[in-house]
Image: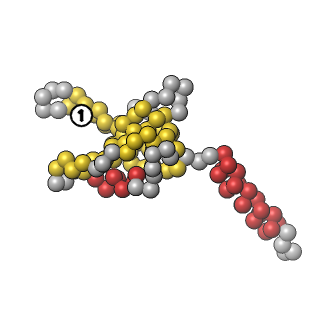
Amino acid sequence: MSNNNSLTGTILEIFQAQSITPKLTKLEFILKTEDQYPQDVKIELINDKTKLIQKYKVGDRVNVDLNIRGNKAKNGNYYNSIQAWKISHELTEATIGMNDQNPMRQEETVNDMPF
């Protein structure tokens, strides 16, 4: 399995949380990837991870770190799921540029010290 288990894209839809059992809550959302051939991917958030999506809305560009899980059901069928464990705003070039400029300004000030 690849070590690069993350997707970047735009949130298309956020569904309501579902209480599957007393110990299992699941919330799903759809992420449109920004690949050469964009995909609409359904991603799950499980139990305490359902809170991760609360600060985002439809249309937000995000990076999602995830695990791909698979299991065999009692009926013999195999199932896969994509479960997110971290969501963050996608860094844009403008954001990176602003963050890079501040340390440079501070460094110049430090280098001007008379010691």
- Identity of the residue furthest to the left in this view: 75
Residue 44 at x, y = what percent?
Answer: 33, 43
Residue nearest the viewer, comparing 17 with 44: 17
26 relative to 21 in the view: left or right: right
The mark total stands at: 1
Q: Is residue 67 visible?
A: no
Q: Residue furthest bottom?
A: 115
Quadrant in which the N terminus appears: top left
Q: Is residue 48 visible?
A: yes
At 47% from the left edge and 38% from the top edge, which residue is drawn? 7
Q: Which image quarter holds the C terminus?
A: bottom right
Applied colour scheme? secondary structure
Q: In the figure, is residue 3 to the left or right of 107?
A: left
Name which residue lies at 31% across and 56% down.
Answer: 48
Residue 92: x percent and y percent? 62, 46
Q: Residues within 10 Å of mark 1 (few under 14, many from 20)?
A: few
Depth check: give the residue in front, 115 or 70: 70
What residue is shown at x 34% (from left), y 53% (from top)?
Answer: 49
Give the image location of residue 43, x and y in percent: 36, 40
Three-letter amino acid code of the residue under disc 1: Asn
- Relative to residue 96, is residue 38 depicted above or below? above
Q: Residue 66 at x, y = what percent?
A: 40, 42
Quadrant of residue 110 in the image?
bottom right
Query: Disc 1 designates what residue?
Result: 71
Question: Who is closer to the viewer here, 7 or 109?
Answer: 7
Name above or below for residue 94 compared with residue 114: above
112 lies left or right of 103 = right
**Secondary structure category for the residue under label 1:** strand
Position of 50 compared to 111: left or right?
A: left
